[in-house]
């Protein structure tokens, strides 16, 4: 159906804008990453401009989401947003840092379990 394309672009643009804002990125930063003008990115986020497949893949990497999530093909995680954000941050850490983070999380869990 030809009329659905505009709605699909608008929904994709909304998801992209939401992901960008969630990470605290500015349009200028994302546009520079994609080698686009800020106006082009504004067009994408408003649904006025089509997104090239390569741009969508780069946005998914930048936003640490899957292409399926950004296009609405996948459901969002059932985890609370702050937990998902922590997981994304931890994914960029070294293995040693993630091990240390795990130890700290276990410490906090045992501390709250003991009522301290």
Image (cartoon, rainbow, N blue to C red):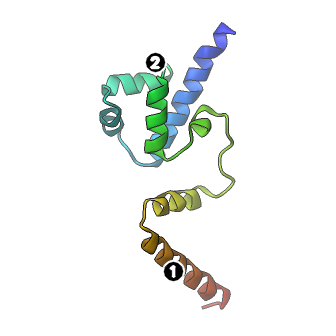
Q: Residue at x 56, y 85 (%)?
A: 107
Please tell me whether residue 64 is drawn above or below residue 104 in the rendered image: above
SS under mark 2: loop
Q: Give coordinates of residue 80: x percent, y percent.
A: 63, 58
**In the depicted view, which residue is nearer to us: 18 or 36?**
36
Quadrant into which the C terminus falls: bottom right
10 Å neighbourhood of mark 2: few (<14), some, or many (≥20)?
Answer: some
Q: What is the number of the mark on residue 26? A: none
Q: How many marks?
A: 2
Q: Give coordinates of residue 49: x percent, y percent.
A: 46, 18
Q: Give coordinates of residue 83: x percent, y percent.
A: 58, 61
Q: Give coordinates of residue 40: x percent, y percent.
A: 37, 22
Q: Quadrant of residue 2?
A: top right
Q: Is residue 13 left or right of residue 1?
A: left
Q: Residue furthest toward the front? A: 95
Q: Residue at x 51, y 28 (%)?
A: 13
Is residue 45 in view?
A: no
Which residue position is annotated with label 1? 104
Distance CA(mark 1)–CA(mark 2): 45 Å
SS under mark 1: helix
Q: Residue furthest toward the top? A: 2
10 Å neighbourhood of mark 1: few (<14), some, or many (≥20)?
Answer: few
Quadrant into which the N terminus falls: top right
Please tell me whether residue 109 is drawn above or below residue 35 in the rendered image: below
Is residue 64 in view?
A: yes
Please tell me which of labels 1 and 2 falls first in the chain.
2
Please tell me whether residue 77 is drawn above or below residue 52 in the rendered image: below
Q: Residue at x 67, y 34 (%)?
A: 73
**In the depicted view, which residue is nearer to us: 107 or 61?**
61
Q: What is the number of the mark on residue 49? A: 2
Q: Quadrant of residue 44?
A: top left
**In the depicted view, which residue is nearer to us: 66 or 3?**
66
């Amino acid at each position: 159906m030809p009329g659905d394309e505009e709605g699909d672009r608008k929904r994709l643009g909304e998801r992209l804008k939401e992901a960008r804002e969630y990470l605290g990125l500015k349009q200028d930063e994302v546009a520079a990453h994609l080698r686009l003008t800020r106006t082009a990115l504004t067009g994408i986020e408003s649904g006025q401009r089509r997104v090239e497949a390569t741009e969508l893949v780069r946005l998914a990497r930048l936003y640490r989401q899957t292409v399926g999530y950004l296009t609405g093909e996948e459901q969002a995680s059932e985890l609370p947003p702050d937990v998902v954000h922590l997981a994304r941050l931890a994914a960029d850490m070294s293995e040693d840092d993630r091990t240390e983070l795990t130890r700290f999380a276990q410490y906090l869990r045992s501390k709250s379990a003991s009522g301290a």
